[in-house]
Image: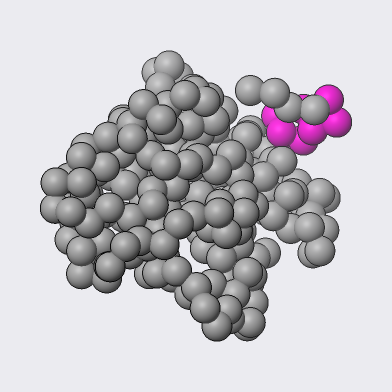
């Protein structure tokens, strides 16, 4: 993980506060970097790397799943406070679905949702789903684009089965993935059969603009 020098100390302190479940300290550390006009950048520079680091420590057996879960929940609460919805809506837009695939970390999805709302997009928010549930939603709603967020590698690998099942039922929206596993392995999104990968939540508007519409 590459983190600029000026963020290393705040990042270490932020991770420590999260693992201590010190909500007040977490809030204060985030607010030292938060700029209302560039809120998503502050979150991506501090919150995302912190949760990625915590996820790596969990995979190495250094942290409990409870610590990972609570760290994510604290960050999710802060993101909802700092990234409110915007009112404008696009007149002509693709049918977009957003989901977490077999994962329990909502932060990435909530950040993407905030960016979509700020960009004026309507979208179906499916929350946490498994492969078959997601396929059923895609068929029912006839999606043009499906956005999948994950934090853990096993969840990222399940995208391969999702793509296979979507192809099998003949309902294949443009599949865009994002999350730590795809940033750590830049070929992974192609290996699991996705059509595109976003390195950050802010990428979603550019990727949506470039996405083809699903054939009727």
Image spot of residue 14 (x, y percent):
68, 38
Image spot of residue 55 (x, y percent):
47, 30
Q: Nearer the viewer, residue 72 or 157?
A: 157
> Which quarter of the rendered picture does the N terminus lie within?
top right
Left or right for 47, reference 97: right
Image spot of residue 115 (x, y percent):
60, 62
Image spot of residue 8 (x, y percent):
77, 27
> Which quarter of the rendered picture does the C terminus lie within?
bottom left
Q: Nearer the viewer, residue 180 or 58?
A: 180
Q: Nearer the viewer, residue 88 or 29?
A: 88
Left or right for 202, reference 213: right
Left or right for 13, reference 149: right
Tell me the residue at 62%/54% (across/down).
206
Residue 158 sits in which quadrant?
top left
Q: Is residue 185 visible?
A: yes
Compared with 121, 154 (above or below) is above
Compared with 188, 160 (above or below) is below
Instruction: Provide the residue span drawn in magenta.
Output: 5-13
Compared with 209, 33 (above or below) is above
Tell me the residue at 74%/49% (across/down).
42
Query: How many numbered marks are there?
Result: 0
Tell me the residue at 44%/47% (across/down).
176
Q: Among all residues in the image, which is located at the extreme right?
A: 6
State yes or no: residue 12 in magenta.
yes
Q: Among all residues in the image, which is located at the extreme top?
A: 60
Q: Among all residues in the image, which is located at the extreme front?
A: 215
Q: Is residue 126 visible?
A: no
* Image colouring: one colour
State yes or no: residue 62 in magenta.
no
- Magenta stretch: helix, strand or loop mostly: helix
Tell me the residue at 21%/49% (across/down).
166
């Amino acid at each position: 993980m590459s983190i600029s020098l000026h963020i290393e100390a705040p990042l270490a302190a932020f991770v420590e506060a999260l693992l201590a479940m010190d909500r007040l300290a977490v809030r204060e550390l985030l607010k030292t970097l938060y700029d209302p006009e560039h809120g998503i950048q502050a979150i991506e520079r501090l919150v995302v790397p912190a949760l990625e680091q915590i996820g790596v420590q969990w995979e190495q057996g250094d942290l409990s799943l409870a610590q990972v879960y609570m760290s994510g929940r604290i960050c999710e609460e802060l993101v909802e406070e700092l990234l409110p919805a915007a009112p404008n809506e696009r007149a002509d837009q693709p049918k977009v679905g957003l989901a977490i695939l077999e994962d329990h970390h909502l932060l990435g999805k909530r950040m993407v949702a905030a960016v979509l709302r700020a960009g004026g997009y309507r979208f179906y928010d499916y929350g946490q789903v498994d492969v078959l549930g997601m396929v059923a939603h895609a068929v029912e709603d006839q999606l043009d684009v499906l956005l999948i967020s994950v934090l853990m590698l096993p969840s990222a690998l399940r995208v391969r089965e999702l793509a296979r099942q979507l192809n099998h039922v003949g309902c294949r929206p443009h599949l865009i993935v994002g999350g730590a596993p795809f940033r750590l392995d830049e070929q992974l999104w192609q290996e699991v059969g996705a059509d595109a990968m976003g390195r950050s939540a802010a990428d979603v508007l550019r990727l949506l603009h470039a996405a083809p519409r699903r054939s009727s």
